[in-house]
Amino acid sequence: SIPEKQWAQVVEKKGGPPVYKQIPVPKPGPDEVLVKIRYTGVCHTDLHAMKGDWPIPLKMPLVGGHEGAGVVVAKGEMARGIEIGDHAGIKWLNGSCLACEFCKTGDEPLCAGQQLSGHTVDGTFQQYAIGKAAHVSKLPKDVPLDAVAPILCAGITVYKGLKESCARPGQTVAIVGAGGGLGSLAQQYAKAMGLRVIAIDGGDEKRSMCESLGAETFVDFTKSKDLVADVKAATPEGLGAHAVILLAASEKPFQQAVDYARPRGVIVAIGLPAHAFLKAPVFDSVVKMINIKGSYVGNRQDGVEAVDFFARGLIKAPFKTVPLEKLPEVFELMEQDKIAGRYVLEIPE
Ligand code: 8ID
Ligand code: ZN
Ligand code: ZN
């Protein structure tokens, strides 16, 4: 049976830290389900949310988290397509209007009426979380709930970003921030899609992780004396990368990517450093016919496909599991860029 009270990590004021305390268990509305969360990933977005980094509405007090995997335990009378007992994932896009032009054409991340888990509505750093039935991801029962959790944001986002890059099998993709949560999964999706990976990040722990994930080259941005030259040297004929996937939570690489992108290269901006700007030389961008674009999570079908890659055993990225109580420590490590791969929180039963 569903209890009245539950454990949660609650950000009570902008800047945090999160407070581990008991709060009421929410009740699902007519078009919603209640998911008993078993595991939830910690995305850098959760840290941006706690700090109030972005120019969008922020609920306060806030339960963060948007990579939650668990079991449906209750549903509203209008909730369709998912049943009590099903395994389900709650994602960043908690809900959208389903009626606007963007929703109707599979661009629901662009919906003006969207709700965001762990930003405008409470997320998955709690034992029981609410999701709109139309948007929760149904998960196959034989998929482990801990390893699949990071797929629900990081996996979907990088899979979508790689599709947006239009890179074809055999082409070279530079992944910037390759040692982080999104980056480690991006390498695996890229490999599964037949792409060749140049991983860019810092430190020996991330180097060895990237090499084990299948990167052909690792460029250490903290040590390289000429990062642009090092990246280009790793590409066929030294012409540069066909695609650049920008996942770093810092601004510098967003202003550097044009220099090592190949002519006709596509630069996909995904990382969301606070108050940052994309800046590129006009001359080089024009004469190299560079394409710079943004990519924001994924639609419901991108979610199905990203989970399917995982369910077929094609995606294996390292993660560390700690109890929900340890969220503040995970945020501290993340702030210092000390996390290779992803942290997953285990939610108490
Ligand atoms: O839909 C979206 N666009 C979306 C979805 C999910 C997450 C965007 N994001 C955003 C997050 O909000 C965050 O800004 O993507 C960014 C990365 O999220 P993450 O992978 O969860 O963060 P992380 O695990 O901390 O990894 C970031 C990595 O970037 C490296 C760090 O060392 C770390 O490994 N990095 C940094 I910071 N500066 C770098 C640089 N100059 C760099 N790597 C290479 N060069
Ligand atoms: Zn995320
Ligand atoms: Zn809409």
Image: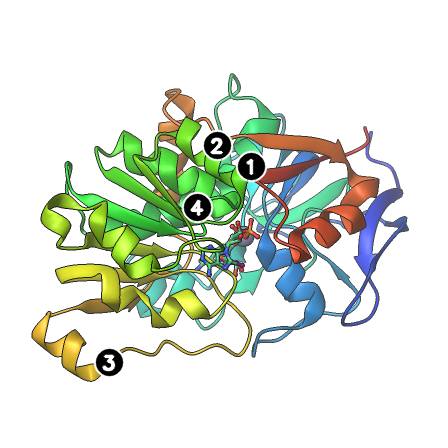
* Residue at horizontal 42 percent and vertical 55 percent from the top: 297
- Name the residue beneath numbered marker 2: 208
Judging depth in this view, the residue of 102 and 176 nearest the camera is 176
State how many labels appear.
Answer: 4
The percent coordinates of residue 83 (x first, y second) are 56, 31
Question: In the rendered structure, which amino acid carries the disc numbered 1?
Answer: Glu
- Could you tell me if the residues under marks 1 and 2 are in contact, i.e. CB atoms within 8 Å? yes
**Mark 3 to mark 4: distance in Å?**
25 Å
Question: In the rendered structure, which amino acid carries the disc numbered 3?
Answer: Pro
**Mark 1 to mark 3: distance in Å?**
33 Å
Q: Mark 1 vs ligand 1: CB under 8 Å? A: no
Circle on res. 244: none
* Residue at horizontal 49 percent and vertical 55 percent from the top: 222
- Name the residue beneath numbered marker 4: 178
Residue 346 falls left or right of residue 252: right
Please say whether residue 86 is visible from this viewpoint: no
Nearer-N-terminus badge (2/4): 4
- Name the residue beneath numbered marker 3: 281
Q: Mark 4 vs ligand 1: CB under 8 Å? A: yes
Circle on res. 205: 1
Residue 210 falls left or right of residue 168: right
